[in-house]
């Protein structure tokens, strides 16, 4: 009996060694597998709203309550938690406001990291948007608990502390998460376990969540879920106590409206797969006006282009008021200054021989672009195009200093796009077609994220592509020898 026992031990030892030396899957693969095992991306994308009803128990305190949660794409959320004898905790978000109204702390507006965490929690169909929510994900190893193996992932959000999640190696399901939450009482660590996965309209969801924080254990059990339920718009409106806080905050603001935080971005531009140009821009909004301002440089073989400034100022309806383009093409200075009013663009055009007046007929809502670079002004189209069906949408593009041309945009739907860091989240694909003032047809493809920021641009006829910073192109495979 000794020899067979030793042989069996040896086989088990070799199997264990093989398991521990097997390469870990990337965190991206683990997160994408979770999407697949819970129903697949297509099933998630069929869901547009969700209402859940649950019981909440805090056993140590002898408290039992009920909770109703309302959620709607892209990020609307409201939760009402009722504890008999204790009171109601009502929380939600609307626009840029995140609020909570409770019997314990009263009405308050969330801010800082706590606000950012609430926005992240409110993302509808969150699992399929993880690439938008986290700047870094990594698989740090395997942990075994009660005989089961789990991949331990660390996810770093854009704001807040890193989150540790545990995915069952066999099933691919999320079993546990460790988080540090920002609260008015400071940072509080919590451990959340998820169990009892059940299908709700084709997507597996945990129906029992247990949260351990400090000395308390809170158990939430989902009793029913309504997917794609009709939720009245006013359901997400804050209660009167929160409205009063908002009015008070508005009165306390400085009389001079401050500019909103300036979104910024960078593009790397490739020609035939080789980097040839870069652009940097900012967007500011103040006094009911929006300014797109950027610069860039390009090296197209023997021709160097320096975009000193490209600036477009519009009103709140995207109607251009003023535009400026300044660039150096080699040793030649090019400059255009345009003002817009009464269906016309009045320009001062300098092609290196002094400014000359020029007047062009332009629609009031035309998109102001340049004949080639820079590409960032196309963000105006990204903000205006309707992302709902494939019906052609008519726009007008004014090539600054030249002429206006009709532009047709078609929404192609959501697509997964491959980048150097892996497959990106589902991006909105928009195709735009026009004819240049010189009579040359041109087609552009845009991939836009949920915030309507352009992530990728392709101009097939020129074999040109542009990528937003953080979304590098996939390396081109070396030709076979």
Image (cartoon, helix red, strand yellow):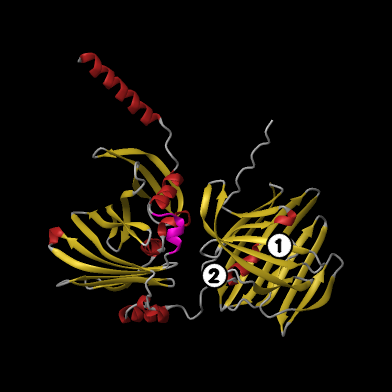
- Disc sitting over residue 472 in the figure: none
- Visible in this render: residue 133? no
What percent of the width, then of the height, locates residue 123?
Answer: 41, 63
Question: Callout 1: helix, strand or loop?
Answer: strand
User: What residue is rendered at 67% in x and 33% in y?
Assistant: 480
Q: Quadrant of the N terminus?
A: top left
Please tell me how crowded label 2 is: few (under 14), some (14-19), or many (20+) other residues with Cα within 10 Å.
Answer: few
- Visible in this render: residue 114? yes
User: What residue is rendered at 62% in x and 76% in y?
Assistant: 318
**Residue that badge 2 annotates:** 388
What percent of the width, then of the height, locates residue 264?
Answer: 57, 61
The image quadrant of residue 224 is bottom left
Q: Disc 1 and disc 2: Cα gap in Å?
A: 20 Å
**Residue that badge 1 annotates:** 443
User: What residue is rendered at 75% in x and 50% in y?
Assistant: 299
Question: Callout 2: helix, strand or loop?
Answer: loop
* 379 on left or right of 177: right
């Amino acid at each position: 009996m000794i020899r067979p026992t030793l042989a069996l031990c040896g086989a088990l030892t070799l199997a264990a060694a093989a398991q521990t030396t097997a390469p870990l899957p990337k965190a991206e693969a683990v997160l994408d597998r979770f999407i697949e095992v819970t129903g697949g991306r297509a099933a998630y994308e069929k869901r547009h709203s969700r209402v859940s009803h649950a019981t909440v128990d805090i056993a140590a305190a002898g408290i039992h309550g009920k909770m109703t949660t309302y959620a709607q794409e892209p990020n609307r959320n409201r939760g009402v938690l009722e504890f008999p004898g204790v009171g109601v905790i009502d929380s939600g978000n609307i626009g840029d406001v995140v609020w909570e109204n409770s019997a314990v702390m009263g009405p308050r507006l969330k801010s800082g990291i706590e606000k950012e965490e609430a926005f992240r929690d409110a993302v509808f169909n969150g699992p399929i948007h993880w690439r938008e929510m986290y700047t870094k994900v990594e698989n740090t190893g395997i942990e075994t608990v009660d005989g089961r193996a789990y991949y331990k992932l660390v996810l770093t959000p854009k704001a807040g502390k890193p989150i540790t999640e545990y995915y069952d190696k066999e099933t691919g399901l999320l079993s546990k998460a460790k988080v540090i939450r920002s609260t008015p009482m400071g940072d509080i660590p919590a451990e959340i376990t998820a169990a009892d996965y059940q299908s709700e309209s084709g997507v597996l969801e945990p129906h029992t969540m247990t949260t351990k924080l400090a000395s308390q254990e809170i158990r939430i059990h989902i009793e029913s879920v309504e997917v794609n339920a009709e939720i009245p718009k006013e359901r997400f409106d804050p209660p009167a106590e929160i409205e009063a806080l908002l009015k008070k905050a508005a009165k306390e603001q400085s009389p001079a409206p401050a500019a909103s935080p300036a979104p910024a971005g960078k593009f790397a531009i490739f020609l035939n797969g080789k980097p040839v140009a870069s652009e940097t821009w900012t967007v500011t909004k103040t006094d009911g006006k929006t300014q797109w301002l950027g610069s860039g440089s390009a090296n197209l073989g023997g021709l160097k282009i320096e975009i000193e400034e490209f600036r477009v100022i519009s009103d709140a309806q995207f109607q251009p008021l003023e535009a400026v383009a300044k660039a150096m093409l080699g040793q030649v200075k090019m400059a255009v200054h345009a003002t817009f009013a009464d269906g016309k663009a009045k320009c001062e055009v300098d092609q290196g021989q002094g400014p000359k007046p020029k007047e062009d007929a332009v629609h009031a809502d035309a998109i102001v672009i340049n004949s080639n670079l820079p590409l960032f002004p196309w963000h105006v189209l990204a903000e205006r195009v309707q992302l709902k069906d494939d019906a052609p949408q008519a726009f007008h593009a004014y090539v600054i200093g030249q002429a206006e041309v009709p532009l047709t945009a078609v929404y192609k739907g959501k697509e997964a796009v491959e980048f150097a860091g892996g497959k990106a989240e589902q991006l909105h694909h928009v195709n735009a077609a026009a004819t240049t003032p010189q009579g040359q047809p041109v087609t552009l493809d845009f991939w836009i994220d949920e915030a309507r920021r352009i992530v990728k641009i392709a101009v097939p006829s020129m074999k040109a592509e542009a990528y937003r910073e953080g979304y590098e192109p996939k390396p081109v495979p070396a030709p076979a020898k």
